[in-house]
Image (cartoon, rainbow, N blue to C red):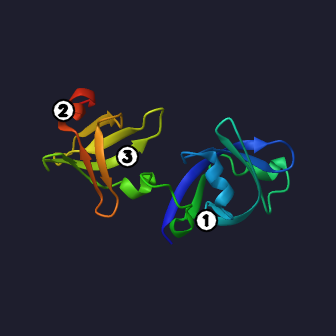
């Protein structure tokens, strides 16, 4: 099963077994479309979903109280990739771009996308062919095109050189 990590359990919420999730999705509302999740390989059916302040609060079958919810603290929230909600045009899952080739608009290879750190503006980690890591924000005008089918991101050479942290 190809997996997709969509969040992390932060802590129990209340006394009835609800858990507070930090979502890795653009919108916490995406969790409303998901029927089940996996935590450390164990499947949990979602019984209830609430959202607020950018967090998701889930009620899960088999997690009846705060003590049971506490055991889930810090675990990644995983779903099968083929059950992921369909994203709007122009959006993509981080998992779909990791490992992509990064090239300039002229086709000059820069390296591969090693990691994405979520922030107000996501921070991408580029791994050069020489093994160096270069960090850069996915700010406006840096990433020109995303081709998930061919695992290729096209960057503006000028903007990349302005914002990259070497």
Tell me whether circle 3 and circle 2 mark residues in contact (CB < 8 Å).
no
Residue of label 3: 115
Q: In the picture provided, is 65 more to the left or to the right than 94? A: right
Classify 10 Å Cα crowding around label 1: few (below 14), some (14-19), many (20 and above). Answer: few
Q: Nearer the viewer, mark 3 or mark 2?
A: 2
Q: Is residue 125 above or below residue 75?
A: above
Residue 2 percent location from the top left of the image: 48, 68
Disc 1 on helix, strand or loop? Answer: loop
Answer with mark 1 or mark 2, whichever residue precedes in sequence: 1
- How many tags in the picture? 3
Residues at marks 3 and 2, CA–CA distance in whole angstroms: 22 Å
Quarter in which the C terminus is drawn: top left
Classify 10 Å Cα crowding around label 2: few (below 14), some (14-19), many (20 and above). Answer: few
Residue at horizontal 58%, vertical 59%?
A: 78
Residue of label 1: 41
Residue at horizontal 36%, vertical 53%?
A: 98
Disc 3 on helix, strand or loop? Answer: strand
Q: Which mark is residue 158?
A: 2
Residues at marks 1 and 2, CA–CA distance in whole angstroms: 44 Å
Answer with mark 3 or mark 1, whichever residue precedes in sequence: 1
Classify 10 Å Cα crowding around label 3: few (below 14), some (14-19), many (20 and above). Answer: some
Tell me whether circle 3 and circle 1 mark residues in contact (CB < 8 Å).
no
Q: In the picture provided, is 134 more to the left or to the right than 34? A: left
Q: Nearer the viewer, mark 3 or mark 1?
A: 3
């Amino acid at each position: 099963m190809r997996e997709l990590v969509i969040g992390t359990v932060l802590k129990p919420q209340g006394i009835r077994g609800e858990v507070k999730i930090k979502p890795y999705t653009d919108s916490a509302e995406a969790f409303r479309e998901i029927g089940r999740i996996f935590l450390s390989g164990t499947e949990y059916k979602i019984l209830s979903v609430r959202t607020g302040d950018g967090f998701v609060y889930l009620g899960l079958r088999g997690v009846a109280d705060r003590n049971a919810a506490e055991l889930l603290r810090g675990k990644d929230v995983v779903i099968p990739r083929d059950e992921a909600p369909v994203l709007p045009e122009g959006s993509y899952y981080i998992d779909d771009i990791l490992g992509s080739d990064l090239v300039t608009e002229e086709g000059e290879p820069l390296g591969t996308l090693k990691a994405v750190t979520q922030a107000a503006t996501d921070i991408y980690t580029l791994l050069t062919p020489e093994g160096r890591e270069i960090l850069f924000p996915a700010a406006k005008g840096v990433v020109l095109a995303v081709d998930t089918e061919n695992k290729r991101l096209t960057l503006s050479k000028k903007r990349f050189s302005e914002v990259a942290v070497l």
